[in-house]
Image (spheres, rainbow, N blue to C red):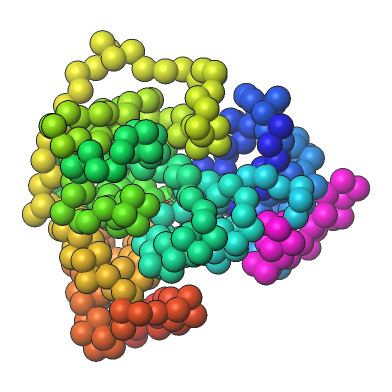
Amino acid sequence: MKKIFLLGATGSIGTSTLEVIRKYPKDFELVGVSANSNMKKLEMIIKEFKPKYAVLTREHSFKDCDYCKFLVGEKSYEEILFSEDVDIILIAISGIAGLYPTIKAIESGKRVVSANKESLVAAGDIVLKHLEKYNQTIFPVDSEHNAIFNIFSRIEKNFIKKIILTASGGPFLKKEITERTSIEEVLAHPTWNMGNYITVNSATMMNKGFEVIEAHYLFKMEYERIDVLIHPQSLVHGIVETIDGTHFMGASPNDMKFPIALALFYPAIPEQKFKSINLYEKPLEFFKVDQRKFPLLEFCYEMGRIGGLAPTVLNATNEYFVDSFLKGKIKFSNLPSKIIKTTEKFINTTKPERGYSLEDVFTIDSEVRKFCEKL
Ligand SMILES: NC(=O)c1ccc[n+]([C@@H]2O[C@H](COP(=O)([O-])OP(=O)(O)OC[C@H]3O[C@@H](n4cnc5c(N)ncnc54)[C@H](OP(=O)(O)O)[C@@H]3O)[C@@H](O)[C@H]2O)c1
């Protein structure tokens, strides 16, 4: 029986993780949960799972409870992360807010399972150094990285030529993006049901660009050896090509419960509890990405190659403008150019250094947001 501390329990990945825990009651117990503001959902989770700890990152008034200790604020993660009550830490927080708990989770020596790609995008070098220092691994939940991780870790690295991440292409694969494109159209993802922020990123393909940077750090692969292919069915998630030209593909339904369960059980493979795919039902297609329609993908490669704090800046401009779009302040058709121009402008004016600390990441992140606000 492994004890799980689930950070971001109220979100989309959090909800799928709870379903996995429900299906494997002999293997996992939920001992801690966290949320930012969704007190109502958190209370429902606490009632059902009776965890020992609950963290709220924003101040809230809450009723105390016999079995559950309530803690407030980011710093209170630590008490639980380092507690003997916890074996596995699953980070399902969205955005850069996932960075601090990721760093602390690595230090705790517990198994770190993470869906939070932003911490690797914004602070990849620091996270990587920390993993090496504490002799730790991140078990990825992102379906592409999870598929690749499961193949990659079973093949000697010398034999691997490249890795390929697949992308559904989002709602605009075959549809035009116009000045009138609405928020509803952007949020209508054809194959995945996810939180709003990542759904917008999927529509611009920024999500895939972030995943390329995430893969660069997770698998220690040069950008030249990471490819992206459009695969509209979202069934093959990741591919590893070996030096002889063989392609090993990882396929499962477009259901995050599969990669979550695999990451929790790794290296074991769990007994099947969720509906799988019938490969004869749909043809599997693969296409090249239309770079003109989705310029943010190539821009991520560019920022990733510059390295240092460039991806940190990109992550912050993206969070800022996606939020502006979701609030109806800017048009979807203008989103990529705003992100690209602002990132370039910030980098050209401030020239962020290559060697950097965790504090620099948070400083740059807040400076970028102020810079965007001014623009
Ligand atoms: N959804 C997917 O299918 C999917 C797939 C692959 C990777 N991912 C990655 O997984 C992560 C989570 O995505 P999601 O779609 O599950 O997001 P989501 O539905 O928006 O949920 C985000 C979770 O993080 C919490 N949170 C938000 N801001 C916070 C803050 N400042 N401090 C602490 N907690 C905060 C939220 O709490 P409240 O509910 O209280 O606000 C919620 O529990 C992201 O990094 C995303 O890129 C998601």
Q: Residue at x 50, y 32 (%)?
A: 267
Q: Residue 369 at x, y = what percent?
A: 39, 77
Q: Residue 330 at x, y = what percent?
A: 29, 66
User: Which residue is most to the top?
Assistant: 280
Q: Nearer the viewer, residue 297 or 135?
A: 135
| On screen, residue 324 above or below 49 | below
| On screen, residue 341 above or below 332 | below
| Residue 68 in sight | yes
Q: Residue at x 68, y 36 (%)?
A: 2
Q: Residue 258 at x, y = what percent?
A: 46, 29
Q: Nearer the viewer, residue 81 or 235?
A: 81
Q: Is residue 55 left or right of residue 305?
A: right
Q: Residue 364 at x, y = what percent?
A: 40, 80
| Residue 41 in sight | no
User: Which residue is most to the right?
Assistant: 66
Q: Residue at x 31, y 54 (%)?
A: 220
Q: Residue at x 67, y 45 (%)?
A: 87
The image quadrant that residue 246 belongs to is top left
Q: Which residues are magenta?
A: 61-82
Q: Is residue 77 magenta-colored?
A: yes
Q: Is residue 272 magenta-colored?
A: no
Q: Quadrant of the N terminus?
A: top right
Q: Nearer the viewer, residue 190 or 329?
A: 190
The image quadrant that residue 322 belongs to is bottom left
- How many dots with numbers? 0
Q: Quadrant of the C terminus?
A: bottom left
The image quadrant that residue 366 belongs to is bottom left
| On screen, residue 135 above or below 67 | below
